[in-house]
């Protein structure tokens, strides 16, 4: 467990430091936030689509194991499911605290407007959450039963289903296939749905594209896959073995393919938007490329999120550290992609001169997340890290000895 | 013959129009606003009147006056465009609300139920006119020793009393112009119409053929903003 000391330390520090942001949010509402009236969505919404993308991506990759039965990936099925669950929790926390009235969130269920993409979201997330928990449980059940002798928690979590015979395990596998098969359209629906949530907004030309939901899905697969590469490198099965290396390198090649496809979609969006130069859309794109936060796109996204990982995945495809670094870089820098979707779409005056017509907090198209916004997200990330580390320790996410059932 | 041009005050005329419409069932009314940009001098009296009437906190504005500069110095002219909520007939804000907290009333006004609104701000992003703003609960005197009582006076939007404080609605909600529904209900014109120094602002019932607005919206100089969005605004500009 020494290997984990650094990560435990990092997660605990993030959690504790981030508590300041949580405290500020609870005591002063949205007053310390830099989003407001003209830019109503900021870092927290971007983090929500970032985390939910990681979740959808990790989940869809788990279906390669449970639905499409790709044997090379078999051992990381549960790791992918668990990652999907943890990032889903992080996404829900990010968006929940973003609400003006978080305590009214239940109305999304009881008073749903199904004419709103957001109305659909809450139902799809609820279904997805239940599916994830059930699927993870079925995937772990045999291992939980095997652990029953030394872990009270594992014994409890088997809920009495301790049959580890071959028939029982085979039954689990076919159940997993059914659950995973339900999960594929569900994941496509909820993450494509988040993309549609933006895509349907006709008032924001930068979002308003049929490509938006597709780009969301590809981005989810890419970022979720990259995260899995990194997690598998460190917490994967049989670390240090040749099989483990083979697994990570294989995942790396999947990520490289997704990276290429993601860049293609991005090129399509930007080249067409900029060439036609219709102001509403092109202005947002120019803001991304040449605005005050150009470095978020060029340095963090293109440099650290595309070029360097791309080169690492091509020329270092046989090197574990190179592939793992590429995965970590893509996964982390993807937050800038999400920020560059949310904010530039809003940072354009809908009517020329509006911003100077009346002044006040939030009546501006300039936005950079405030300290509270950053700290709160640090807290969310720290909490997610802790949930991951605790789960990894107490649950058979990755079987430490022998082969997977 | 008296040596004066007899002319009815526009406010008196609109007041009479209003009374006539209020006698009808609400579903037969269609409130519209007409803003004559040729008469607007950019004094922002409507903006200020609106802030005072609706007790708007910092960061919330229902009717800014956009100041547009045309030409290059020294050959510069300015024009002014007040921007209330357009009370669209096809309101994009209504469609996107996840909890149905905002809707189109039969009299044409787009209403928000502050108690139902969860504060997700999706409607703010969906409005093509930036007509909705977010109330974060600030006071103008934040950071001073005392926040005066008048800052905490309730708003009376939609005919209800909305006391301010403790994070309760409308704090945490999306807010916007509602043609001063609470004033209309008691037979008064919207505040911005009353305070306009140039009488550039007309208000009335488009379904009443005798109303001043019914004739103005049919004039060749009447335009609406962003027609291409298909929102069918209830606010017209005379240009």
Image (tube, coloured by chain):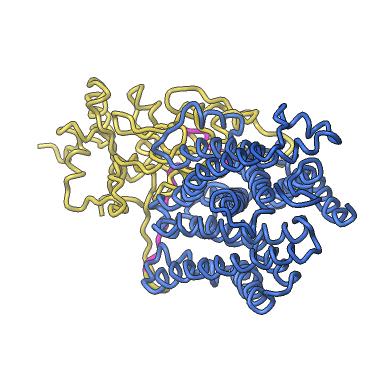
Chain colours: A blue, B yellow
Q: Quadrant of residue B3?
A: top left
Q: A278 left or right of A252?
A: left
Which residue is situated farthest in the left direction here? B1
User: Which residue lies at the image location 50% right of the left edge and 47% below the top edge?
Assistant: A184
Q: B56 left or right of A306?
A: left
The answer to whether A300 is drawn above or below residue B67 in the figure is below
Q: Quadrant of the N terminus of chain B?
A: top left
- Residue A194 percent across, percent down from the top left: 49, 48
Which residue is situated farthest in the right direction here? A2
Q: Quadrant of the C terminus of chain B?
A: bottom left
Res A285 visible? yes
- B194 or B106: which is nearer to us? B106
- Residue B208 percent across, percent down from the top left: 18, 31
Is residue B106 magenta-colored? no
The answer to whether B68 is drawn above or below residue B234 in the figure is below
User: Which residue lies at the image location 48% right of the left edge and 70% below the top edge?
Assistant: A264
- Residue B124 percent across, percent down from the top left: 47, 45
The answer to whether A197 is drawn above or below residue B146 in the figure is below
- Residue B9 percent across, percent down from the top left: 25, 36
Which residue is situated farthest in the front direction here? A166
Q: Which residues are magenta?
A: B53-70
Is residue B57 magenta-colored? yes
Q: A251 left or right of B119?
A: right
- A77 or B167: which is nearer to us? A77
- B194 or B109: which is nearer to us? B109
User: Which residue lies at the image location 74% right of the left edge and 41% below the top edge?
Assistant: A143
Res A35 visible? no
């Amino acid at each position: 467990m020494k290997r984990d000391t650094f990560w435990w330390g990092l997660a605990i520090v993030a959690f504790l430091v981030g508590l300041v942001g949580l405290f500020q949010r609870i005591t002063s509402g949205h007053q310390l936030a830099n989003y407001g009236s003209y830019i109503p969505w900021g870092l927290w919404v971007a983090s929500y689509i970032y985390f939910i993308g990681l979740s959808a991506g990790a989940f869809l990759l788990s279906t390669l194991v449970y639905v499409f039965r790709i044997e090379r990936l078999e051992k990381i099925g549960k790791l992918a499911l668990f990652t999907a669950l943890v990032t889903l929790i992080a996404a829900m926390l990010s968006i929940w605290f973003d609400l003006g009235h978080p305590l009214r969130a239940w109305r999304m269920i009881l008073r749903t407007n199904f004419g709103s993409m957001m109305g659909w979201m809450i139902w799809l997330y609820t279904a997805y959450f239940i599916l994830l928990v059930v699927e993870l449980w079925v995937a772990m059940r045999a291992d939980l039963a095997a652990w029953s002798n030394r872990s009270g928690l594992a014994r409890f979590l088997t809920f009495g289903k301790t049959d580890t015979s071959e028939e029982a395990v085979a039954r689990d596998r076919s159940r997993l296939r059914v659950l995973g098969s339900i999960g594929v359209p569900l994941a496509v629906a909820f993450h494509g749905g988040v993309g549609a949530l933006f895509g349907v907004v006709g008032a924001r030309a930068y979002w308003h594209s049929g490509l938006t939901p597709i780009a969301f899905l590809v981005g989810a697969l890419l970022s979720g896959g990259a995260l899995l590469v990194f997690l598998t490198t460190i917490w994967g099965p049989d670390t240090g073995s040749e099989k483990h290396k083979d697994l990570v390198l294989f995942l790396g090649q999947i990520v490289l393919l997704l990276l290429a496809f993601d860049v293609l979609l991005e090129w399509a969006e930007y080249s067409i938007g900029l060439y036609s130069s219709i102001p509403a859309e092109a202005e947002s794109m120019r803001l991304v490329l040449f605005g005050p936060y150009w470095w978020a796109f060029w340095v963090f996204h293109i440099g650290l999120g595309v070029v360097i990982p791309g080169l690492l995945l091509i020329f270092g495809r046989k090197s574990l550290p190179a592939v793992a670094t590429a995965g970590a870089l893509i996964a982390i820098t993807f937050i800038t992609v999400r920020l560059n979707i949310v904010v530039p779409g809003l940072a354009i005056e809908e009517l020329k001169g509006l911003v100077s017509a009346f002044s006040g907090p939030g009546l501006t198209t300039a936005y950079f997340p405030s300290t509270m916004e950053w700290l709160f997200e640090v807290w969310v990330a720290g909490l997610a890290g802790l949930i991951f580390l605790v789960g990894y320790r107490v649950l058979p996410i990755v079987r430490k000895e022998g082969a997977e059932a | 013959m008296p040596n004066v041009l007899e002319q009815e005050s526009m406010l008196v005329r609109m007041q009479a129009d209003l009374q006539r419409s209020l006698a009808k069932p609400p579903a037969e009314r269609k409130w519209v606003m007409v803003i004559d940009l040729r008469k607007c001098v950019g004094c922002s009296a409507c903006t200020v009147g609106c802030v005072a009437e609706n007790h708007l906190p910092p960061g919330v504005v229902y009717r800014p006056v956009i100041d547009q500069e045309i030409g290059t110095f020294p050959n510069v002219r300015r024009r002014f465009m007040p921007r209330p909520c357009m009370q669209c007939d096809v309101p994009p804000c209504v469609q996107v609300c996840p909890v149905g907290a905002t809707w189109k009333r039969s009299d044409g006004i787009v209403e928000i139920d502050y108690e139902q609104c969860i504060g997700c701000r999706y409607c703010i992003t969906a409005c093509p006119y930036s007509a909705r703003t977010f109330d974060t609960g600030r006071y103008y005197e934040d950071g001073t020793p005392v926040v005066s009582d008048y800052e905490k006076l309730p708003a009376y939007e939609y005919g209800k009393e909305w006391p301010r404080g403790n994070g309760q609605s409308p704090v945490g909600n999306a807010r916007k112009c509602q043609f001063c529904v609470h004033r209309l209900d008691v037979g008064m014109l919207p505040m911005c119409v009353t305070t306009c120094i140039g009488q550039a602002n007309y208000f009335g019932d488009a379904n009443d053929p005798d109303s001043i607005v019914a004739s103005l919206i049919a004039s060749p100089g009447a335009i609406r903003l962003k027609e291409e969005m298909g929102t069918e605004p209830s606010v017209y500009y005379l240009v």
